[in-house]
Amino acid sequence: MTEIDRQWTTRLRKRSFGKLPPEKMLPDTQPSYVSSWIYVFGVATISALIVVIATGCILAIFGPEWWHISNIGHFVNSLHLWSVEIFFFAMVVHLWGKYFMAAWRGGRAMTWMTGMFLFLASIVTGLTGYVSQTNFDSQWISTQAKDAINSSGGGGFFNLLNPGQMLMWHIVLLPLILVILVAVHVVMVRIKGVVPPFEDDQVVAPVDDEEVVAPSAATVESAGAPQ
Amino acid sequence: MSNKGFRPDVDAPEWKGGHTPYDIIKEGTIALVVIGLLTVGLAVVFGSPDIPAVTIKSWSNAAPIDFANTALSELNGTSITAAYGAPYNVQSSSASQQLGPIKLEYWVGVHIPINTTKDFVVDPLEALPNQPVLHQNLAQWNGASKATRTKWINNYTKVAPKMKFVGGQVTVPSANDGPLPVMINDLTMMARSGALDQALITGDSFYSTDYTQSLLFISDGSYLASIASQQHLLGEQWGVMNETGSYPGSAWLWLYTLWYQIPPMSNSSNADVEVLAIMVLLTAGLTLMPFIPGLRSIPRRSRVYRIIWREHYANQKTN
């Protein structure tokens, strides 16, 4: 092994490109079974997130109270609200679509789990957004939701009644977490590919979960199996 | 890998069929444009709600008796905040929510200390300048023993149901209640001027982003809840997932709010921690679904995937 081969940079590059070569990251073909409207909702979720972040950035430029006093600000807030509604709608449809595909099969459990973490992080981001609106909504939601946070013992550290703290979570910490999780989730999808359909012999004769059956395909994908 | 040991809900058959052209960049671009246009369309047609915040000034002007009674509850320790327990003040463990023997709220303890008598009533009044009568009464309050204060509070509380707001003043029938009539009346006047809003927000600092005290004080009254009720935001109105007006709210919280409508949570003093525990369990179950035998078989047994992959199965049949 040469000195260059031993370099951390070389090793990282080889490992990264080994797991995710460019043709997997940006594929130009897909398996023929990927043919359903349900597949649209993953990319729709990411697209809505881009609109959410873009409109949130505009609101951030002018500050949290701008939208109360400016018609343009109010319109940008409306864009932010509706993109959030679309984001959650698309994400929930995507989640249930993947559930009914049992999309964790073939070593994709972590892809499923990062998707769930994304859903949870999105809910917390939505909550911090609601309580950062500086209007009646914020007052009511924060004073009601505090009881749930307090009951967990977390109210003294994650104080919904402190809009300054909530705004920081909403526009810095949680978006950062979301973007990182989306990146990890998408990379996992690209590495593993889209989960194949159940085999027909499994379809015709449902078996108990713990029973073993032989699929018609010669090989299988399983946790840790090479793609 | 051998076919032996193939688990249909864990393993996936390797795809050996055909592939079709797929332009991922084009798909992403089209999706972004469509979602962007849909967002603009919805924002133009429906806009977004913005009901102004309630201030202590607006509350005490709209409902002075509600404010004065809330101020009394802060003074006599019967308000929600005064009796809340952790994280705001020290109370017995029964004041905090608990899940069987688990008392997280109580165990974590006080981290945002609030003494409602001092922080919501006495300190703001003491900050008012040039009020000789008020300050005489405050001196009487501060110099009194605990027993005397309790006697005054009890006497005032007895006549409080007959409280009136006449000529811009809060009045109650005379009782042996020491400085309380002046304190409650002057705090109401302070609130109606807007000075109490500022006093509770800023505290000792010029800058503040912390509205904990103001929000707790306002939510102890019934005025905020009356507006929430008109906006169908109360718990029994499935308020957790609603938005002001007719706008869609947090519809994704439908399951969370559902549990609040069902006994025993619907009439439990520990409803929040009970619902939280249920949701944590369900969420953990869904997150760990790939590892739970039985549950992970539901998608295969439900056969919904036959709809999702109907073209694939139709093609297989044809071939």
Image (cartoon, rainbow, N blue to C red):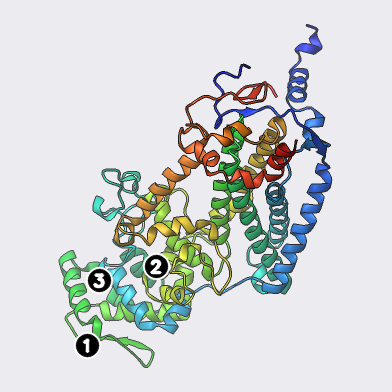
Amino acid type, label 3: Trp
Q: Secondary structure at mark 3?
A: helix
- The residue under label 1 is B173
Amino acid type, label 2: Glu
Residue B294 in the figure: left or right of residue B247: left
Q: Is residue B59 above or below residue A208?
A: below
Q: Secondary structure at mark 1?
A: loop
Crowding around mark 2 (Cα neighbors within 10 Å: few <14, some 14 to 19, many 20+) is: some
Q: Residue at x 46, y 40 (%)?
A: B285
In the rendered image, is residue B161 in sight? yes
Q: Say which of A218 and B227 sits in front.
A: A218
Which disc, if any, is residue B287?
none
The residues tagged by marks 1 and 2 sit, at their Cα atoms, a distance apart of: 37 Å
Mark 3–mark 1 CB contact (< 8 Å): no
Amino acid type, label 1: Pro
- The residue under label 3 is B141
Residue A47 in the figure: left or right of residue A118: right
Image location of residue B261, percent across then percent down: 38, 62
For the C terminus of chain A, the image quarter is top right
Q: Residue at x 50, y 36 (%)?
A: B296
- The residue under label 2 is B236
Crowding around mark 1 (Cα neighbors within 10 Å: few <14, some 14 to 19, many 20+) is: few
